[in-house]
Image: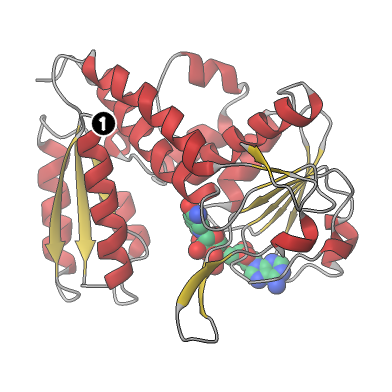
């Protein structure tokens, strides 16, 4: 974490924070009797997906996690399902990860539901979604390891918020704070909302049909934007000294035609008012991948008796 000389807010350095998490993951994998095994499923040849998968494979390997990839064509939905059923039964496999988004021709929900809930390292299987929403206390879950996996971006967001709170308010507690989430997706908005409630925050979830977004964001002690709309949040929409978590990730071409990652929050102007802020890129993204590896580790710890 660093204090940017031209801005007031602490910049939450996702790369460094993720690196610390990865160090712990590596230590824990070395204590297992066998390396955790992750299988990634890729459908189609989307270049961005291939890039993300390659970086996950590389990171997994560096952390002592055995990771392999199976690739399928866009017209092979049944073959993918067959492979998933096979992997569900394969005792050597701890975690199965379909690289999302899947091509539009695929029934994404059907595919996610076909993965054994015990090997669902993304935490998106309906059984794991229900477990999260029925949880009454977060500590109960985290202290016992992964009796079920929690969606990785939501876990990353909470981790960043706790670091920001400690740095700016000398506490890790979200109790009673106004948290506003922009976005209500299954992947980010909803699981993040569940974690915020478990942390006793006072929660508002905004979305594309919300009227007068600013009237909500202005009250946020912690604002999490996961809309995928570049520049959606400007400095007039935020509260002074708030913590800003930018999940949005959109690739836009600059004047030279070079594509760059852009978040939802106007970083330069908002960082003059906020107390802490995540950059894009280098904020939430690295945490998401680190939490994925941690989920794989925790699943393997629960399954450690399986050889
Ligand atoms: P999604 O499209 O499924 O959901 C977007 C949500 O934002 C919806 O609930 C929608 O109602 C809301 N929304 C859209 N426009 C809005 C507006 N103008 N005002 C208020 N609400 C609005 O997307 P998602 O999968 O939740 O991802 C959201 C963003 O986060 C994307 O940019 C995605 O690339 C990014 N993302 C980043 C990471 C990471 O690790 N960095 C992980 C997951 C998603």
Q: Pick the quarter of the image with the N terminus.
A: top right
Q: Pick the quarter of the image with the C terminus.
A: top left
- Residue 231, above or below 117: below
Q: Which of 71 and 262 is in front in this view?
A: 262
For the view shown, which residue lies furthest in the front direction? 5
Please state the horizontal and vertical placement of residue 124, each as a whole percent of the image. Answer: 42, 46
- Asked which secondary structure carries label 1, the reply is loop
Q: Going by the image, does 177 lie left or right of 251?
A: right
- Residue 20, above or below 104: above
**Residue at numbered disc 1:** 63
Q: Going by the image, does 148 lie left or right of 169?
A: left
Residue 2, located in which quarter of the rendered image? top right
Residue 246, located in which quarter of the rendered image? bottom right
In this view of the protein, can residue 200 be seen by the observer? Answer: no
In this view of the protein, can residue 303 be seen by the observer? Answer: yes
Q: Nearer the viewer, residue 167 or 192?
A: 167
Q: Which residue is found at the position 58% from the left and 17% from the top?
A: 139
Image quadrant of ligand 1 equals bottom right
Please state the horizontal and vertical placement of residue 33, each as a whole percent of the image. Answer: 15, 14
Q: Which residue is found at the position 66% from the left and 36% from the top?
A: 161
- Residue 177, above or below 146: below
Please state the horizontal and vertical placement of residue 67, each as a whole percent of the image. Answer: 17, 41
Please state the horizontal and vertical placement of residue 191, each as a whole percent of the image. Answer: 56, 44
Badge 1 crowding class, 10 Å Cα cut-off, few under 14, some 14 to 19, many 20 or more, is: many
Q: Which of 110 and 303 is in front in this view?
A: 303
Mark 1 within 8 Å of ligand 1, using the beta carbon: no
Q: Which residue is found at the position 45% from the left and 28% from the top?
A: 20
């Amino acid at each position: 974490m660093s204090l940017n000389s031209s801005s007031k807010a602490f910049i939450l350095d996702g790369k460094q924070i993720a690196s610390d998490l990865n160090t712990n993951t590596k230590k824990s994998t070395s204590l297992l009797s066998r390396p955790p095994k992750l299988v990634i499923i890729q459908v189609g040849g989307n270049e961005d997906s291939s890039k993300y998968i390659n970086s996950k494979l590389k990171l997994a390997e560096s952390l002592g996690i055995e990771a392999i990839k199976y690739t399928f064509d866009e017209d092979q939905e049944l073959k993918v399902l067959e492979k998933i059923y096979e992997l569900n039964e394969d005792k050597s496999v701890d975690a199965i990860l379909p690289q999302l988004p899947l091509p539009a021709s695929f029934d994404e929900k059907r595919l996610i539901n076909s993965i054994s809930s015990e090997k669902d390292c993304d935490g998106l299987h309906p059984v794991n979604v229900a477990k999260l929403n029925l949880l009454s206390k977060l500590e109960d879950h985290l202290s016992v390891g992964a009796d079920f996996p929690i969606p990785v971006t939501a876990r990353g967001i909470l981790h960043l918020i706790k670091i920001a709170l400690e740095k700016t308010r000398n506490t890790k507690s979200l109790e009673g704070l106004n948290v506003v989430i922009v976005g209500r997706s299954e992947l980010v908005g909803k699981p993040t909302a569940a974690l915020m409630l478990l942390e006793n925050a006072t929660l508002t979830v905004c979305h594309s049909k919300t009227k007068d977004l600013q009237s909500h964001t202005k009250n946020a002690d912690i604002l999490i934007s996961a809309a995928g709309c570049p520049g959606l949040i400007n400095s007039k929409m935020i509260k002074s000294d708030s913590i800003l978590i930018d999940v949005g990730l959109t690739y836009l071409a600059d004047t030279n035609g070079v594509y760059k990652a852009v978040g939802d929050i106007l970083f330069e102007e908002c960082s003059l008012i906020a107390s802490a802020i995540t950059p894009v890129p280098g904020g939430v993204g690295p945490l998401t991948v680190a939490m994925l590896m941690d989920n794989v580790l925790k699943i393997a710890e629960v399954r450690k008796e399986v050889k």
